[in-house]
Image (cartoon, grey):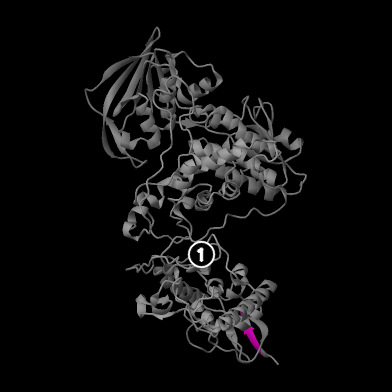
Amino acid sequence: MSINITINGKQCEAKPNQSVLDACRENGVVIPTLCHDPRLNPFGSCMICRVEIEGERGVPLSCGAQVRDGMVIRTESDAIKKSRKTCLELLLSQHYGDCTAPCVLECPAHTDVQGYIRHIANGHYDEALKLIKETNPLPVVCGRICTRPCETKCRRNILEGKVGIAYLKRFVADIDLKKGVGRRPGSYLPAKKSPTGKKAAIIGAGPAGLSAAWFLTQEGHSVTIYEKQESPGGMLRYGIPSYRMPRETLDQEIEIIKSLGVQIVYNKEFGKDITVNSLKADGAGAILLAVGSQKGYPLGVDGESKCANVLIGIEFLGSVTRGKHPDFNGKKIAVVGGGNTAMDCVRTSMRLGAQNVKLIYRRTIKEMPADELEIEEAQLEGVEFDILTNPLSVSQSGSTVTMKLTKMELGEPDASGRRSPRPVAGSEYNLDVDYVISAIGQTQDLSFISGDCSVSTNRDCIVADTHTMMTNIDGVFAAGDGVTGPKTAIMAIAGGKRAALAMSHYMNGKTIAAEEILYNHLKAKDYKDIDSSKIEAEEIEKIHMPMLTEEQRSHNFKEVELGFSEEQAKKEAQRCLQCGCADADECKLRNYAAAYNANQDAFAGEQITHPIDDSHRFIVRDRNKCILCARCVRICIESGSGVFGFVGRGFDTTVEPPFSLPLGEEKTCNSCGLCVSTCPTGALTPRKDVKLPTTAYTDRAHAENGLGEGSGASEAITSIEEAIRQAKRSKINS
């Protein structure tokens, strides 16, 4: 027997006495809910399963309303959405936790930092490496030269200092590198899909191009990189000194990428030796422009064009790589700039035997864009810093370059947010040196743009769609510094991956979808806003990177950083606070917050926080993420244990074991895992190093929670019911 109802204008059938929620689900209409479990009576605590019923006021809860013949139901409207959003924001106002760790959010490639660090702490180095390479095929490189944006957001900064994330990445990457390409067992290579017969062409073998090739090849496509230089790496080779990025080490990592099936053709200049049309004629279904920022800016002062001994920083570093640099032995060098390229130039000059090296910078050290570590290392190696100084003109007589300089003072902040420097009247003076190096910035050489490659540009950058990475020319994509301007290796790597996935979809005839935007709850927008007393961790001494002494690095290009030992790596990894939620990928609160664009600060106010209870053998309990849905309470009672109950009233209410004991100390829990499987958030999660003894947890039966129905849902429910029977038998037997 059935009755007739109308759902969103469609005639449907329902069972008598069935709830509106269940009737809608059986007819393929999903209504969001956080507190519903199909085996339990409706509770209505989450308040988000609201609908509109014709003839009734307001937006009643669908879990508590029964269907009747002729009922007309609407599950989506502006009023319903507003009500659901408000309810979600009320829940979020007392939710304290991070969906995704801040370090992961800050990484341009969104590498699972806390995941691979956890593997390192447990000694699982192969698993750590595999996790890294899901998003970054150049961990050997990034472990050495990354600007470490992840570390700037590390919550350990609240205590004794950030975790050495890049150093840990280098540790596992170096282990993998030593296994060797082509040997069995060799360096890790991911699985490749079956060949598609499609060909992709990439212009440039820098980090963006290499990254794109790595991911395209995994998709089963044939990939060829065309590089105008004689060796691969782009700025990694020709812009980063070998004492930071040893060339043999770089070559080894690139060989791993090539061994996946990537072909690199050298000494091929795009626009001359090869073109868009020639590549398409050769069968390329998609082309990626992955050109870097290898064109340095001149000083832009009077007399510069007449001075042979005024060099461009990025060209100077490239000449050192090629072994064709000027003789700096015993010479006086002045480098103008305050970024990482300037630091590379001054430190390289010292290694080439310069008698004296000065860094000329128009602001103070505090305003320098260079990495703090690079600044410290330059000072350690004997570089003199002439801050608040700026060149006005240059002239050359014989081999001597005379710079006219002026002292500067800082005024109001400019467009960069830094205080704007201005000349101090009457402070001009001259400085005589043998060479001046301009390291004030870089741009892109886009001289190849013409004819069949007339891509759109803006401010010397290629214009590419943010989501698809495609240019205005169909089938021609772009990524890396050529699109963003001079940025970082990890940003280029991330761009290369995005481009690869878009190119793969394009060649396979699929729609290029925009990257999914996930909701991310944060304990605070900045670690400085977190009360250190809320960090449940003891201070642990930070492990510092072993380095060559000042004497050991003098006049040579030996790698300065020596790498962690296994003991050091494990100790440093154990400092990680594991900020991200273990259940973030399955959390229904997160999914609905994203769907309804909920704001965690909409009802900001005093927030009650609780320590994490990890006393149980199998379960971790985080009351900060509990939404008081009572599912764990009710399902535990149903199983015959009754471990959980409500304690307190109002905002002070919590779910607790008897007498508020730690979960591991009360005596009635039989570890059935039902509470974990039914929890819609990360309030109850399994310990990472163990597995619950029944199937309830491993099924993670979230299909019944409201995000979809199907055979998986019924199987999951069946397994939970069996787990309940097991739990009851276990209790009786005990």
Q: Quadrant of residue 363?
A: top left
Q: For the stretch drawn in magenta, what is the main secondary structure?
A: strand
Name the kind of residue labelled 1 in the image.
Ala
Q: Quadrant of the N terminus?
A: bottom right
Which residue is the site of mark 1? 594
> Horizontal and vertical percent for residue 179?
63, 37
Residue placed most toward the observer, 149 or 229: 149
Residue placed most toward the observer, 614 or 477: 614
Compared to residue 95, the image places residue 155 above or below, namely above
Compared to residue 661, the image places residue 452 above or below, namely above
* Left or right placement of residue 535 versus residue 273 in this view: left
Q: Secondary structure at mark 1?
A: helix
> Horizontal and vertical percent for residue 48?
50, 76
> Horizontal and vertical percent for residue 76?
55, 76
Name which residue lies at 37% across and 49% down.
540
> Horizontal and vertical percent for residue 693?
59, 69
Task: Tell me which segment is drawn in magenta.
Answer: 4-8
Farthest-out residue, top? 398
Q: Residues within 10 Å of mark 1 (few under 14, many from 20)?
A: some
